[in-house]
Image (tube, helix red, strand yellow):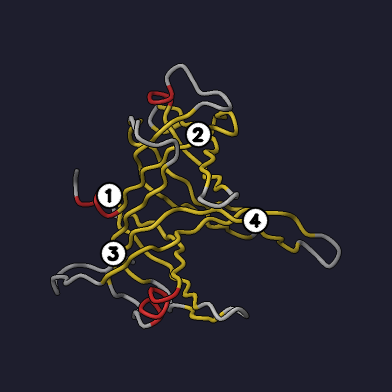
Amino acid sequence: MNTYEKNNRVILKGKVCEEPIYSHTVLGEGFYEFVLEIPRLSVESDKIPITISERLLGAGLKIGDSIAVDGQFRSYNKVEGSKSRLMLTVFVREIIDIVDCDNYNEIELSGFVCKEPVYRITPFGREITDLLLAVNRAYNKSDYLPCIAWGRNAKFASELQVGERVEIKGRIQSREYQKRINVENSETRTAYEISVTSLQTPYIDQDEEVAN
């Protein structure tokens, strides 16, 4: 596993809740998208967008199939009219076997704080900090990934400085929200973020480049 793969690793196991549909072709290889549903410990579940190559897809997947994947959480900009939206997806590198559990959701990241953290306290007194992490990828690319820290982690995260490197462990979660289109209309959209379970700021060499 090279350095860039270590910077960003996701392992998921769940059930297919939308059949794969064709997305795009790169260097003659087709890629497909589908949604993986992973139950939480509560009654809710997370529905995570997945991108997979036709080579790994093989004979295909159908709704209800169980699958475990090893990959990376990636971002890209989607142009809609005159505006651009940050889109997130798990890019599958390998289909794996996880036999000791029905569901699995784990992510490890090493990246750089690229926006000032936003700290707040909920009406119920819970501390929350929002982070945007830039994670270096091969070919001079970076993924920009939203993270949310709670409680003690939130306080620690709120003191991080832009450009500071941080290592994070957590899980990918989804949530629906209402996006207002105009005065009269709104639409339901889904946001994705990393719920942080642990984070630390490792020592880095002064010559190491910060993501831009």
Q: Secondary structure at mark 3?
A: strand
Q: Which residue is mark 3?
A: 167
Distance Cα–Cα, label 2 vs label 3: 32 Å
Distance Cα–Cα, label 3 vs label 4: 27 Å
Residue in the image at 34% along x and 79% along y:
160
Q: Is residue 149 left or right of residue 142?
A: right
Amino acid type of the residue that numbered disc 1 sits on in the rendered structure: Ala
Q: Which residue is mark 2?
A: 24
Distance Cα–Cα, label 1 vs label 3: 18 Å
Other-residue count near label 2 (Cα within 10 Å), few / some / many at <14 / 14–19 / ≥20: few
Amino acid type of the residue that numbered disc 2 sits on in the rendered structure: His
In the image, which is nearer the foreground, mark 1 or mark 3? 3
Distance Cα–Cα, label 4 vs label 1: 31 Å
Distance Cα–Cα, label 4 vs label 2: 26 Å
Nearer-N-terminus badge (3/4): 3
* Badge 1 vs badge 3, beta-carbon distance below 8 Å: no
Q: Which residue is mark 4?
A: 176
In the image, which is nearer the foreground, mark 2 or mark 3? 3
Distance Cα–Cα, label 2 vs label 1: 20 Å
Quarter placement of the N terminus: top left
Location of residue 103 by image quarter: top left
Relative to residue 9, is residue 209 depicted above or below?
A: below
Q: Position of residue 15 (x, y in %)?
A: 52, 33
Q: Position of residue 161 (x, y in %)?
A: 34, 80
Q: Position of residue 210 (x, y in %)?
A: 26, 69
- Which mark is on residue 138? 1
